[in-house]
Amino acid sequence: MKNSALLHVINLKKYFPAGRSFFGTVRSYVKAVDDVSFQVEKGSSLGIVGESGSGKTTLARVILRLIEPTSGTVYFDGVNIFSLDKNELRKLRPQIQMVFQDPMASLNPRKKIKQILEQVYKLHTTLDLKTINEKVANLLERVGLTPPELFLERYPHELSGGQRQRVCIARAIALNPRLLIADEPVSALDVSIRGQIINLLLDIHRDFPEMVYIVISHDIALIKSICEDTLVMYAGKVVEQGKTEDIIKKPLHPYTSMLLSAIPVPDPDIAKSRDRPTITGETPSLINPPPGCRFHTRCPYAIEKCRKEPPPFYNVEGREVACYLYEKQ
Amino acid sequence: MVKFLKILEVSNLAVYYETTEGIVKAVDGVSFELKKGEVLGIVGESGSGKSTLAFTITKLLPKNARIVNGNVWLYPEKIDLLKIPNDYMRKIRGRRIGMIFQDPMTYLNPVFKIGHQIAESIVFHYGVSWKEAKQRAIELMEKLKIPDATNVASRYPHQLSGGMKQRVMTAIAISCNPEILIADEPTTALDVTVQAEVLAMLKSLIRDMQMSLILITHDLGIVAEICDRVMIMYAGKIVEVGDVYSLYKDPKHPYTVGLLNAVPSIKSERATVATIDGTIPNLINPPQGCRFHPRCRYVWDKCKNMEPPLIHFGENRAAACWLLSEAQ
């Protein structure tokens, strides 16, 4: 099993210094990602779901090594990416790509679409200009920007939000990456455009079955349409992980069930008749997270133990759940 | 119950923005009614004109906006809000029409304490002393389940979380018992679990205070949760309107159908998500005829040349689509 894992994250932590004393010593930390471990098999897709402040974006940035971790290791295809030097990392970059939330902010406004995409090949390959041009045109066609001639000479501001996100996806898949991380790929887009981008992501996964997808979102419905597996995060910790379908059908962790019941259902018959557990409180501060289980302040089932000891993972019905409710089994 | 009394009527409203690129027809010929105690959802994507509509009713439009045509009548007196002077409008705004906006941080004043900001409109509209107004503000906050209200009242907006700020905004909006509450994307900036709390709060407010609510959103899920009636807007026009139960079950306008299918649902079994092709039209040069026709899969010649009117059918349903006139 370990051999087929493309990405293996072990005890990853990222603490951001939050306050410094007069002499510059760090007084407190924001524990954005606190002891997260998981692995992703080749060709699979993992969704990371959580609310704002749950650490999902920080996690992605650490995996990409856009920021350095506080501790922990990430193995990409057996290589510890934190042990790589600048040159080795540069060689690894084409294999790990990311699509960000806001396509306008991640495209250079002064460069034409053609230049944005050409640059990827110029930086990472030794192809001649003619081949590059062909590749760029194919790429645009691949992401549904047809005919390519119509888009090559345009600037990002001349495109709509959906088209810009297509350009971002094109740039990300240009070098056939083995890992594609998409951070809230559709939340900046209008409802009628979202479906187009989700379908494009699904199409691409069909074309590159070896590629691993990690989709980060607060919207579990989006993750359900793309990912087989899901990791639920709360306040920097993983609370539940398993098959997306199982999690949605029968959430085990009290936080997961709260999250699922909070989603508005676009069907008035269901929406108006169902009983929802009352939700109280908000995501805790990560500078002084609650001791024990971080969810205990909002959990209807919290017992004495939850307030003291952080729960370990229990294996329940093929899933990992960090909750004392499952201690006996 | 007096639920069927008309309280607000918008008739044939057209609002254009003058920009350097040309005239943007943000709202173009919109008419609807709001009844007492009713929750009306206005759904649309960016550029559909839904927020412009809210800003027109409250007369808070930016300077480059022109009200080209139409009336907004407030009942029972049938005051035309678009014709009255600003002084008079100030007495209505906040007192009879309350507002909640999308991003509470931009609408709360960062240099005043929460208690002061809630008390301000009570002092303005009721003429009570600041002391009494602040006491009422704290009672209001308790009613909206803000924990430790006395303490929160003496804090500044930046010290509160997003959900808490939205509750404070709501407290300001309802401080003078308005008959109509307009909420423009009240939960878009919030997390889902906090959103569920804010929606539950709004629901119980409407029930207890007999308020009418206009809820503006792009999320059909939220509409299903709390609205009685829903109005779908596209490119400055109403494309469909009806009660939520029958409209969700049997949408008639191709845009409504597309929108309902395009929401990825945790309940659905589909492998791919249904989509609406194309992009939202430019409102400086909107498409001729039906504004949805370039994206519509049932388009025919008539749609390209003539604009469909709202065609009424069934009980309280209407849609602006030529397909309906053919069916009848």
Image (spheres, rainbow, N blue to C red):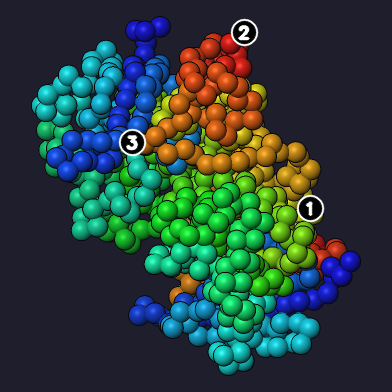
The structure residue drawn at horizontal position 67% and vertical position 39%, both measured from the top left corner, is: A278
Q: Mark 2 — residue?
A: A328
The x and y percentages for residue B272 are 56, 36
Q: Amino acid at mark 1?
A: Tyr
Residue in the picture at 60% in, 22% down:
A303
Element under disc 2 = loop
Judged from the image, the secondary structure of the residue bearing numbered disc 1 is helix
Residue indicated by mark 3: A30
Question: For the residue labelled by badge 3, is the local secondary structure a helix, a strand or a loop?
Answer: strand
Q: Nearer the viewer, residue B139 or A150?
A: B139
Is residue B117 among what the camera can see? yes
Q: CA distance from mark 1 to mark 3?
A: 46 Å
Graded by Cα atoms within 10 Å as few (under 14), some (14 to 19) or many (20 or more), the crowding at tag 3 reads: some
Residue that extends furthest to the right in the rendered view of this protein: B1
User: How many numbered badges does the structure rendering display?
Assistant: 3
Residue found at the far front of this picture = B131
User: Quarter of the image containing the N terminus of chain A?
Assistant: top left
Residue B261, position as x, y percentages in the image: 63, 46
Residue B314 as seen in the image, left or right of residue A62: right
Circle 1 Cα neighbour tier, 10 Å, few/some/many (<14 / 14–19 / ≥20): some
Q: Indicate which label's residue lies in the foreground, 2 or 1.
A: 2
Tag 1 residue: B245
Question: A151 above or below A233?
Answer: below
Residue drawn at x 52%, y 45% is: B191
Q: Earlier in the sequence, mark 2 or mark 3?
A: 3
Position in image of residue B320 (x %, y %): 69, 68
Q: Amino acid at mark 3?
A: Val
* CA–CA distance in space, label 2 to label 3: 33 Å
Horizontal side of B56 relative to A201 (left or right) equals right
- Label 2, residues with CA under 10 Å away: few <14, some 14-19, many ≥20: few
